[in-house]
Amino acid sequence: MRNIIFGILVLGFALLSCKSDDESLQRIDQILNMYMKNSAGQDLLNSKKSGSYNGYSVNDMFGDRDVSPVNVSLKMTPDSVFYMEYIAGAKRIRLDSVSPSNPGTGNSYYSRMTLELRRTVNSVSDTIIDTLEIQYRKSPTLFQVSKVLYNKKEVFSKEAEAPNSINTFTIVK
């Protein structure tokens, strides 16, 4: 009888310890969708169109080696517009311990990558090297993209309490 009561108590404590607390979960919001077009509105990631990029590679500037590739996949919307999707993979460096624009909200981090965009113009290969910097904000309840810089120009920003979403922006080249 004593073993049965002890077993019920152990089972009860085990069930109570499995209780989930949604308040203690950290929201993570870090997916980026990057579109590229020229000033005329042409999709520069569609390799079948003349003047568009026919290849690309992404390298982590803070990687452990000189060549530290980052996985950025090329995807297409239902209306046949191409975009690059970045989820994660580049090393993050601490930017500051308390963000001046959001004091007391936690730490800020950033990743910096190079994008090698290749295309052929008049039978001549051309490679363009650009930089992409992603800044993140982190608190006990939130980890999200706060700002994106492309060639040191801000192309995307997000307020601290903005809802989770896929962060989308367009680069005009």
Image (cartoon, helix red, strand yellow):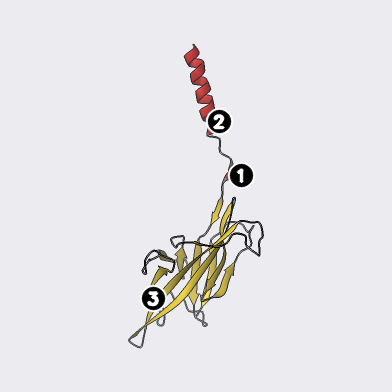
Work out whether residue 100 can be spotted.
yes
Task: Tell me: residue 156, above or below residue 119.
Answer: above
The reply to whether the C-beta atoms of the residues labelled 2 and 3 are less than 8 Å apart is: no
The reply to whether the C-beta atoms of the residues labelled 3 and 1 are less than 8 Å apart is: no
Task: Tell me: residue 79, above or below residue 29.
Answer: below
Q: Secondary structure at mark 2?
A: helix
Q: Amino acid at mark 1?
A: Glu
Residue holding disc 2: 16
How many tags in the picture? 3
Residue at the outermost bottom position: 122
Sequence-wise first label, 2 or 3: 2
Residue 98: which quarter of the image? Answer: bottom right
Residue 39 on image: x %, y %: 52, 82
Q: CA distance from mark 2 to mark 3?
A: 56 Å
Q: Secondary structure at mark 1?
A: helix
| In front: label 3 or label 1 | 1
Residue at the outermost left position: 123
Q: Which mark is residue 23?
A: 1
Sequence-wise first label, 3 or 1: 1
Task: Tell me: residue 123, above or below residue 78.
Answer: below
Q: CA distance from mark 3 to mark 1?
A: 46 Å
Residue 35 on image: x %, y %: 49, 71
Residue 100 on image: x %, y %: 65, 64
Q: Amino acid at mark 2?
A: Leu
Sequence-wise first label, 2 or 1: 2
User: Which residue is at the front of the view, 160 or 66?
Assistant: 66
User: Which residue is at the front of the view, 74 or 144?
Assistant: 144
Residue holding disc 3: 47
For label 1, the crowd category at 10 Å Cα-Cα, with few meaning under 14, some 14 to 19 and many 20 or more, is: few
**55 relative to 35 in the view: left or right:** left
